[in-house]
Amino acid sequence: MGKAKKEKDIKTNAMRFLDSKKIAYTVNTYECEDFIDGVHIAQMLGQNEDISFKTLVTKGRSGGYFVFVLPVAKELDMKKAAKAVGEKSVEMLHVKDINAVTGYIRGGCSPLGMKKQFVTVIDETAKGFDTVIISGGRLGSQILLAPDDLAKACGGSFRDIVYDGGM
């Protein structure tokens, strides 16, 4: 049977967080030892890139942290992101700081179950799908859930936060 992993039974903080809120989700695991970007993971697993979402953490000019959840093939529009959270500007959190701030590592960062619950904004395109895919909280782990359940779990709001090429 080859790829079945015993780890599948090991819950991440993100999964425990959803369990505590009694929110339904599905877990998908895959072989992954090192960070691979979300587009390649979606292609490798034959998943629709539009429903595969990445989690980006930023720091606002005020010093607060903000979480943005957007399709893996899209870029975060920093101006739209700042406006969505009421900041003058936001900048990406440095990779070396991700673990200290969130408790997760690059490539395994979930908007759920972070060390602290930060203001979270989900790209509005998520609302167009029955299910979205987010990181399960570690490399090789995904969580599939309804967008409204994701928003409810993380206290997130839906906004247009992706870069549209200036159109």
Image: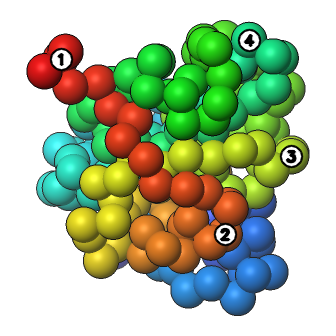
Q: Which residue is mark 3?
A: 116
Q: Which residue is mark 1?
A: 165
Residue at x-position 63% and y-position 14%: 88
Q: Is tag 4's residue or tag 1's residue first in the polypeptide sequence?
A: 4
Name which residue type carries label 3.
Lys
Residue at x-position 21% and y-position 25%: 164
Q: Horizontal and vertical percent for residue 31? A: 42, 49
Identify the element where label 1 is drawn.
loop
- Colour pattern: rainbow
Q: Horizontal and vertical percent for residue 34? A: 49, 29
Which of 137/124 is in front? 124
Structural distance between the alpha carbons of marks 4 and 1: 24 Å
Q: Which mark is residue 61?
A: 4
Q: Is tag 2's residue or tag 4's residue first in the polypeptide sequence?
A: 4
Q: Horizontal and vertical percent for residue 86? A: 65, 30
- Above or below, 32 against 65 in this view is below
Q: Is residue 67 left or right of residue 11?
A: left
Q: Is residue 98 left or right of residue 43?
A: right
Q: Which residue is mark 2?
A: 153
Name which residue type carries label 2.
Ala
Structural distance between the alpha carbons of marks 2 and 4: 26 Å
Name which residue type carries label 1.
Gly
- Above or below, 151 against 83 in this view is below
Q: Is tag 1's residue or tag 2's residue first in the polypeptide sequence?
A: 2
